[in-house]
Amino acid sequence: MSRKGQQIHIVGKGQFGRALGRHFKAFGHRVAFYGRSNLHSISIKRGDIIVLAIPAQSFPDIAQVIPKMLRARAVISAAKGLIRGINQTTSQYLNSKGLRRVAVLSGPSFAREINQGKPTALVIASTSRALSAELAHKLSTSQLRLYINTDPLGVEMSGALKNVYAIGAGIAMGLDLGQNALASFISRSLAEMSAVSLASGAKRKTVFGLAGVGDLILTCTSTKSRNFRFGMGLAKGKTQKHLMRRLGTLEGYWTLAPALNVVNKLKIETPILHAISSVVLGGRAPLKLIESLMKRTLRHEF
């Protein structure tokens, strides 16, 4: 594609933010990186694009620079989690601070593979189809394909919940329960994720697209996923403190409490989510998680 390079501000110096920045720069865009130490110096002009590649829990920390973001052409959240204490998605938080040209970027993606130039397909979602289409056109490349989506809530709920279920999948694999159990676990997790997302106002197609089932499969089957490795470590007797120090940011862990608040408010039955919580937040033995799920009262699949 032949396009004029876009000025992109990447807030966040983690693996994913750096991978996106390097990729966009390689395809002719102008990229600037910001972390905690230099965030105050961010200078935004009309037409610029901001990508917030920080953990969901860090969004309140950037509140002081949000007024500057009002000048941007678009603010893109690349976070996958719910913000503790306020139980909001990141786009809901940004909207509450007065930002309107907000989009979310999500889907099955590991930073390492983006760095390696391997083909990746994601969704760019905004309530404005025109904005989603504009961003997809500006940022898609021969290696990064962006699909247009108008359901940011569905994209974010799926992206947040799949990290929680990845912890459970890691527990199942850490206990060496086999491929049969893992496939069943992922299928039933998808059913829960769909129920919660739809009750929150998401669209069914989103849950069964790249940001939903696509990302769920990736995160629940690969040791490249930190949430998956966290679950495996718990199953093998490692302490949470040790694992969190070794693995770094674990969105699934931090999303658990707000996710429970959401499902309790919606009055939705989520036995897998609650079972994972009982292990991660309640200290229950990992094997008990599986036993509790297998011994539940028999019911119709749907």
Image (tube, rainbow, N blue to C red):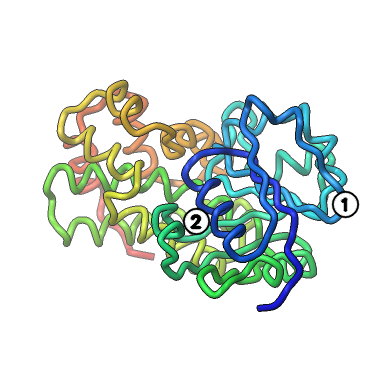
- Left or right: 155 in relation to 129: left
- Left or right: 268 in relation to 127: left
Percent from the top left, x then y, of residue 177?
13, 50
Q: Could you tell me the amino acid type at mark 2?
A: Ala
Furthest residue in direction bottom, as rendered: 1
Q: Residue at x 50, y 69 (%)?
A: 121
Q: Disc 2 to disc 1, how far (Cα)? A: 40 Å
Percent from the top left, x then y, of residue 277?
37, 33
> Which residue is labeled 1 in the image?
46
- Left or right: 41 in relation to 155: right
Q: Are dots 2 and 1 in contact, CB under 8 Å? A: no
Percent from the top left, x then y, of residue 222?
29, 54
173 in relation to 26, above or below: above
Classify mark 2: residues with Cα within 10 Å, few (<14), some (14-19) or many (20+): some
Q: 152 and 105: which one is in front? A: 105
Q: Say the numbered circle drawn on residue 227.
A: none
> Which residue is labeled 2 in the image?
195
**Which mark is in front, 2 or 1?**
1
- Left or right: 213 in relation to 64: left
The local secondary structure at tag 1 comes to loop
- Choose the circle earlier in sequence order: 2 or 1: 1
Percent from the top left, x then y, of residue 7?
75, 54
95 in relation to 106, above or below: above
- Which image quadrant for residue 99? top right
Classify mark 1: residues with Cα within 10 Å, few (<14), some (14-19) or many (20+): few
Q: Could you tell me the amino acid type at mark 1?
A: Arg
Query: Which quadrant holds the C terminus?
Result: bottom left
Q: 97 and 297: which one is in front? A: 97
The local secondary structure at tag 2 comes to helix
Q: Residue at x 65, y 70 (%)?
A: 148
